């Protein structure tokens, strides 16, 4: 047991150090994986068996990796087709100066739901909103908190979200049923966060509309309803419960045609945007904002996801974390189990430095406890969404928070104002606590 703890501590230090130094997370993950392979071999497991365990664990992530790569392609071509710029443009158009912070939250939520990625949203709509906030004298720390809340609304419950697909894959549940449950549990947290951001908006209103970005978008892109079609396709096909990979591929094909016919990009150039990401060729203030995406941009993230999944294969095969699971199994009722899931998510998010590893490890550690208490896979899925997914964005060195903070160029204090992320687990815990009290009351009355 001592050797496992030492390995965890060493890996934890390596991961934190690499994130703080800006080193690609894949390198420390590879080192950590090698350390755990060595630890397993020292426990008496043959090298060949341990490598098989690692591969078996990594193989589970391939479904999510495919979606990761498609998301990269869709982000690049949506920029080239004018879909993302149009979403930003119309968002800016309907902004009310006295409710700017609230709109920063709502726009980020809407865009992240459509494109399904927190990092894609923060680097487009989020960056545009923070620029407007700075130009209009709005408190940028609170605005960044609202944006971070919004980008994780879609990251949590969009049918295009890789994290939602990961949870569905791990728990062997149906994605759209999970999304319905996520919306149900998001109503109260979303309403509470909206109230908070409304109050902040009146305290820190936008002094000038800062319409430069909207004006620049019109100069560079042909804006209109037609260029929103790729986003509309995702929405409509999702409602029809079409497989998310199929709907995203259809959206990419339509976006390529719009890129060529409406934005007058070359067909070869449009294909390059899908594979390599979008880069604006003409000189424009938007050049620093409207860029990125592409299948290639997700390769490193995909490798990190595969390696992260490999850990679980070793942990499961060697039963390294059995003692942790036994502690979680001591939870007596639903709210205690949820609290244990929160604690586990916090540790895995801090250790793993990535949302993916936090979800995978948390699921591995708590799934037996849920099964023993006859709690359904769908309840486990929603609890993972309400803990590991959002709690990762609380940890300053976790890439779930570090990348948005770096992109927006704001201090870590912004996370204090990411109200929606706090309300998700708090409201869930309160709901389970009340439910447990009600059950105990009914038992007492019966006896």
Image (cartoon, rainbow, N blue to C red):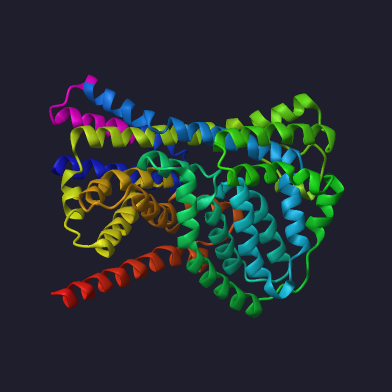
Q: Is residue 192 visible?
A: yes
Q: Residue at x 48, y 67 (%)?
A: 189
Q: Splitting the image into 4 quarters, where does residue 291 fall?
A: top right
Q: Residue at x 43, y 41 (%)?
A: 166
Q: Is residue 335 left or right of residue 278?
A: left
Q: Is residue 396 visible?
A: no
Q: Is residue 219 left or right of residue 269?
A: right
The picture places residue 136, in percent across and down from the top left corner, at 73, 69
Q: Splitting the image into 4 quarters, where does residue 255 fall?
A: top right
34 in the magenta segment:
yes
Q: Splitting the image into 4 quarters, where does residue 426 fall?
A: bottom left
The picture places residue 293, in percent across and down from the top left corner, at 63, 38
Front one among 90 and 122: 90
Q: Residue at x 35, y 70 (%)?
A: 430
Q: Main secondary structure of the magenta part?
A: helix
Region of the chain picked out in magenta, as a range:
31-48
Front one among 60 and 245: 245
Front one among 416 and 388: 388
The picture places residue 155, in percent across and down from the top left corner, at 52, 50
Q: Is residue 263 left or right of residue 60?
A: right
380 in the magenta segment:
no
């Amino acid at each position: 047991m001592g050797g496992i703890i030492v390995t965890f501590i060493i890996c934890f230090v390596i991961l934190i150090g690499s994130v703080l130094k800006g080193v690609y997370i894949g390198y420390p993950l590879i080192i950590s994986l090698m350390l755990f392979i060595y630890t397993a071999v020292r426990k008496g497991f043959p090298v060949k068996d341990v490598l098989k365990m690692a591969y078996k664990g990594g193989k589970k992530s391939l479904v999510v990796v495919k979606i990761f790569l498609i998301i990269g392609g869709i982000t690049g071509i949506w920029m080239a087709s004018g879909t993302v710029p149009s979403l930003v443009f119309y968002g800016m158009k309907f902004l009310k100066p006295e409710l700017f912070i609230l709109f920063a939250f709502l726009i980020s939520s809407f865009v992240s739901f459509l494109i399904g990625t927190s990092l894609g949203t923060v680097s487009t709509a989020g960056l545009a909103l923070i620029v407007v906030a700075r130009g209009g004298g709005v408190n940028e720390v609170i605005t960044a908190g609202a944006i971070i809340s919004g980008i994780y609304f879609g990251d949590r419950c969009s049918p295009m979200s890789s994290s939602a697909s990961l949870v569905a894959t791990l728990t062997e549940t149906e994605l759209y049923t999970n999304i319905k449950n996520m919306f149900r549990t998001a109503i109260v947290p979303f309403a509470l966060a909206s109230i908070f951001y409304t109050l902040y908006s009146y305290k820190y209103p936008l002094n000038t509309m800062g319409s430069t970005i909207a004006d620049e978008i019109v100069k560079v892109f042909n804006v209109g309803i037609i260029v929103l079609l790729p986003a509309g396709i995702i929405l409509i096909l999702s409602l029809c419960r079409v497989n998310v990979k199929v709907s995203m591929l259809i959206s990419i094909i339509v976006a390529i045609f719009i890129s060529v016919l409406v934005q007058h990009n070359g067909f070869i150039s449009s294909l390059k945007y899908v594979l390599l990401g979008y880069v604006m060729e003409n000189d424009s203030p938007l050049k620093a904002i409207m860029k990125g995406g592409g299948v290639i941009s997700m390769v490193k993230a995909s490798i990190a996801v595969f390696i992260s999944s490999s850990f679980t294969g070793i942990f499961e095969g060697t039963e390294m974390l059995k003692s942790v699971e036994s502690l979680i199994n001591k939870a007596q009722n639903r709210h205690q189990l949820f609290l244990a899931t929160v604690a586990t998510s916090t540790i895995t998010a801090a250790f793993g430095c990535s949302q993916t590893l936090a979800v995978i490890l948390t699921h591995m550690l708590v799934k037996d406890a849920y099964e023993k208490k006859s709690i359904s896979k769908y309840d486990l899925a929603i609890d993972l969404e309400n803990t590991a997914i959002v709690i990762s964005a609380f940890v300053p060195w976790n890439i779930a928070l570090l990348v948005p903070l770096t992109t927006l160029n704001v201090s870590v204090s912004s996370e204090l104002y990411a109200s929606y992320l706090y309300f998700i687990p708090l409201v869930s815990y309160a709901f389970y606590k009340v439910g447990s009290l009600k059950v105990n009351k009914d038992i007492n009355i019966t006896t």
